[in-house]
């Protein structure tokens, strides 16, 4: 049974920021039983927050030597997975881009001294289109996709979020898409949830407990300092041998500033504890 904890956001006009788990490849869209509670959570997001004017999607599946921002007016699709049924390569998410928002984001990053550049060609990867197909299925809200910096420096990504925070007052929803647990070796051992109930992986529970406390028990600089040192926490490297799926959280936290965070989703996922967070709602 999933634990979805979305509630109605405040009506101040300031958008929240979200860190959400996007699951395995296209499996949420394909309705995989192992993803049932995550699917239920993602499909409920748009009902629990104000309607955004646009979405800035920070994806774990795009890395570059600077922060890249998509300026495409009509983003294409990037099927960055393999080994799935043919229908996984026919999925379409036809939300428009927003060159105006992209340039606004680039301007904010430049003003903060953060190296950034425009990319007019990259399509929506599955870190973007999979959760948004479930959360915003009408595909009418403009979406701008943004990369991570390949350094995976948590402090840099906290600064990226802080630089982009003014967008929240302009109706923009900052969606950071990753996974609070991402160790493919463990998922493989657990059969990707296709067989009997997998054994629960204790390090994921230890790390998730620490992460929830860090995110929800602190705000502002204290929260940022805790998360910048995430690799020293219990179970950290067992859960993230490489941290690209955790780093989007730093952008959401940086943009949240002094706003409180809450656990918006938490459940066992293929034998591992996975959570999602909402800030400012």
Image (cartoon, rainbow, N blue to C red):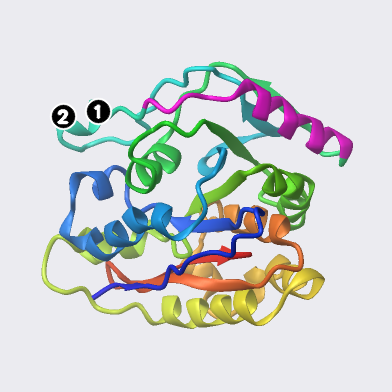
**How many numbered tags mark residues here?**
2
10 Å crowding of disc 1: few (<14), some (14-19), many (20+): some
Span shown in magenta? 94-111
Q: Is residue 279 magenta?
A: no
Q: Is residue 2 left or right of residue 254?
A: left
Which residue lies at the image location 76% right of the left edge and 68% below the top edge? 258
Which residue position is annotated with label 2? Answer: 86
Instruction: Examine the image and state in which quarter residue 193 appears.
Output: bottom left
Which residue is tagged 1?
89
**Horizontal and vertical percent position of residue 233:** 61, 78
Q: Is residue 109 magenta?
A: yes
Q: Give me the residue at 20% from left, 38% from top.
A: 84
Do tag 1 and tag 2 residues touch (Cβ < 8 Å)? yes
Q: Nearer the viewer, residue 173 or 27?
A: 173
- Residue 118 sits in quarter: top right
Give the farthest residue toward the left: 196
Does residue 273 appear anywhere in the picture? no
Query: What quarter of the picture does the N terminus occupy?
Result: bottom left
Q: Main secondary structure of the magenta part?
A: helix
Identified at 47% across, 34% down, the residue is 141
Give the CA separation, mark 1 to mark 2.
6 Å
Residue ranking furthest to the front: 11
Quadrant (top left/top right/bottom left/bottom right) for the C terminus: bottom right
SS at badge 1: helix
Tell me residue 150's x, y (percent): 65, 41
Q: Is residue 29 left or right of residue 135?
A: left
């Amino acid at each position: 049974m999933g634990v979805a904890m979305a509630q109605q956001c405040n009506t101040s006009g300031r958008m929240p920021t979200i860190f959400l788990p996007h699951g395995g490849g296209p499996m949420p869209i394909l309705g995989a039983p192992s993803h049932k509670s995550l699917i239920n959570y993602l499909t409920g997001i748009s009902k629990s927050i104000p309607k955004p004017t646009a979405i800035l999607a920070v994806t774990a599946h795009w890395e570059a030597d600077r922060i890249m921002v998509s300026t495409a007016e009509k983003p294409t699709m990037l099927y960055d997975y393999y080994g799935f049924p043919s229908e996984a390569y026919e999925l379409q998410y036809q939300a428009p881009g927003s060159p105006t928002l992209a340039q606004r984001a680039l301007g904010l990053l430049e003003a903060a001294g953060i190296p950034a550049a425009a990319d007019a060609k990259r399509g929506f990867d599955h870190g973007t289109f999979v959760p948004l197909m479930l959360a915003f299925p009408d595909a009418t809200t403009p979406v701008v996709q943004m990369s991570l910096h390949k350094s995976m420096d948590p402090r840099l990504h906290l600064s990226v979020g802080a630089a982009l925070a003014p967008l929240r007052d302009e109706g923009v929803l900052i969606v950071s898409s990753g996974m609070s647990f991402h160790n493919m070796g463990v998922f493989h051992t657990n059969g990707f949830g296709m067989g009997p109930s997998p054994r629960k992986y204790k390090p994921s529970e230890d790390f998730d407990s620490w992460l929830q406390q860090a995110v929800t028990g602190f705000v502002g600089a204290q929260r940022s300092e805790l998360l910048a040192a995430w690799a020293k926490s219990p179970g950290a490297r067992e859960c993230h041998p490489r941290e690209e799926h955790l780093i989007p959280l730093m952008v959401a936290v940086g943009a949240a500033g002094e706003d409180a965070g809450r656990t918006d989703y938490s459940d066992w996922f293929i034998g591992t504890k996975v959570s999602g967070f909402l800030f400012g709602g």
